[in-house]
Amino acid sequence: MDGLQKFIEKDSHEFPDWINHSRESSLKKYKEVCPKHLKNATWKNTKLNEMLNDFFEKEFSVQQSTLDNIDLKSNLDNSLTIYFHAGVFFTEEEIPSYIKLLNHKYLEENQSIFGLEDRSERQSIPYLLNNIVSRDALMIDTAVNQHVERLIHIVYLPNQNGNVAPRLNINVSGNSSIKIIEEHLQSKNSIINHCIDINCEATSTLEYYKVNHRQNDSYLISNLNLNQEEDTDVKIFNLDLGADSGSSLNHLKLNGENSNVACSTLFMPSDHRSSHQNVVIDHLSDKSSSSVNFRGVINNQATGSFFGKVRVAKERRGTSAFMQNKNLLLSDESKISTVPILEIYNDDTECSHSATSGSLDKEKLFYLKTRGINENDAKDFLIKSFIDELTSQIKSRRLRDYVNEIIAGNYKV
C-alpha cells in the first residue's frame, strides 16, 4: 500500500490538483471497501488477492514495454485504429471530431470520467485502482443523428512487466449508431485493469465487440458499465481466451422503455489459465428486454466460472429476460462453476434461465465415428458446432469471420 501512496505523490506534479484529489479519494475508498469486496461472490473463484499483492509491488512509473518489433497494422482493413501502449492512447490517423484522446490533457470538463460521486458502480476494487493508476482516457461521443459507418478498432498492444489501466468512455447520442471492437493482444507478467463506461441515449444503436487474446502470467480485469435510455438497442460480444487470472464484470442497466440488450460471451481458457465471467442486468424500465448467452470451452487444467444475475425492479411491466450458460469440459482436469440468478419483483415479466456443463456427447461422438470420421476430427466437429451456435449470432459477417479465425488458431483437440 505504501508503494501506491508513493506513486501518487511522485506522479502528482504531472497532473492538475483535481486529478490528484481523485487519486487520493480512490485510495481512501479502496482501503474502506477492499475487505468487504473480497468476500463478494464476484471474486470467489479468482486470484484477486494474488493480483493485489502484485499490484502494490510493481514499479508503476516504469513501463518496460517498447514498440520495437510491433507491427501497427490493423488486421481489420478500412477500420479506424486506435492503439494503447504504456498507459496512453495514440493513433497514426487523423482523429474525427467524435473521438478524443486525452493524453495527459485533462480538461476541466472531463472530470466526470474519474469522479466517484453518486456512482456506486465506481466503488468496486477494479474501478478504484484504475482511477489511481490511469494516465489517459479515450472518449468516443457521437453527435445526434450521426451514423458512423467506419468500424472503430481499439488495439491494446502487448505489455511486458506492466501495470496499465486503460479507461474508455463511450456516449452514443440520440438517434446515432456506431460499431466498436476492442482487442487485447498477448501480454506477459502484467496487470491490465480495463474500465469501460457506455451511455446510450434515446433511439441509439451500439454494436460492441471485445477480444482478449491469451495472457501469459498476467492478470486481465475488464469492468464494463452500460446505461441504456428508451428505444435503444445494444449488442455485445466477448471472446476471452484466458489469463493467469482473467475476470470480466458487466453491469448493464436498462433505464429506458423499450431498451434491448443482447450480451454474448465465449470464454476458452486452456493450460493453467482462467476466465471468470460476471454479468448483472437491471431492468429499471417497462418493456425492456435482455438476452444473456455465455458459453465456456475449458481445456487442460484451466478453470472457468459464470455468475449471472437478472433483476427486474418492482412495478416494471412487460419485461423479458433470457439467460443461458453452457459449458464444455475438454479434459478431466478442467473445472467450471456456474451460478445463474433471477430476482423478479413482479408478475408481469417473462424470464427464463438455464445452465449446463459436461464433456463431449459420447453418443454423438460414436455416431460420427461410425460414419467413417476419425476420433480427433469428430471431436473437432462437435466443438466447432458448440462454438458456432454462439458466433453465428455475431451480426457483422466481417467481424464474425475475424473472431472465428482467432478461435481456430487457439484451441487443440
Image (cartoon, rainbow, N blue to C red):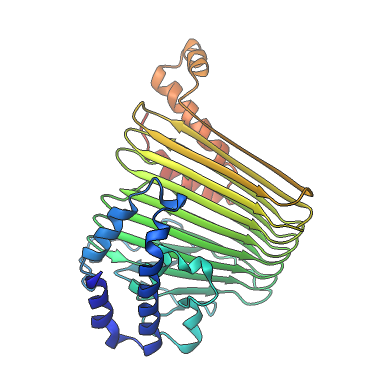
Residue 412, by quadrant, is top left
The residue that appears at 47% across and 83% down in the rendered structure is 111
- Left or right of 226? Residue 221 is left
Question: Percent x, y for residue 173?
Answer: 64, 73
Q: Nearer the viewer, residue 214 or 291?
A: 291
Q: Which of 218 and 65 is in front in this view?
A: 218
Question: Percent x, y for residue 182?
Answer: 45, 59
Vertical placement of residue 76 versus 143, above or below: above
The answer to whether residue 42 shows anywhere in this view is yes
- Left or right of 174? Residue 57 is left
On-image quarter of the C terminus: top left
Question: Percent x, y for residue 95?
Answer: 47, 77
Q: Nearer the viewer, residue 208 or 402?
A: 208
- Left or right of 31? Residue 294 is right
Question: Percent x, y for residue 242?
Answer: 37, 46
Q: Nearer the viewer, residue 412 or 74?
A: 412
Vertical placement of residue 319 versus 360, above or below: below
The residue that appears at 61% across and 65% down in the rendered structure is 227
Vertical placement of residue 101 versus 370, above or below: below
The residue that appears at 68% across and 67% down in the rendered structure is 229
The residue that appears at 43% across and 69% down in the rendered structure is 167
The answer to whether residue 74 shows anywhere in this view is no
Vertical placement of residue 55 versus 3, above or below: above
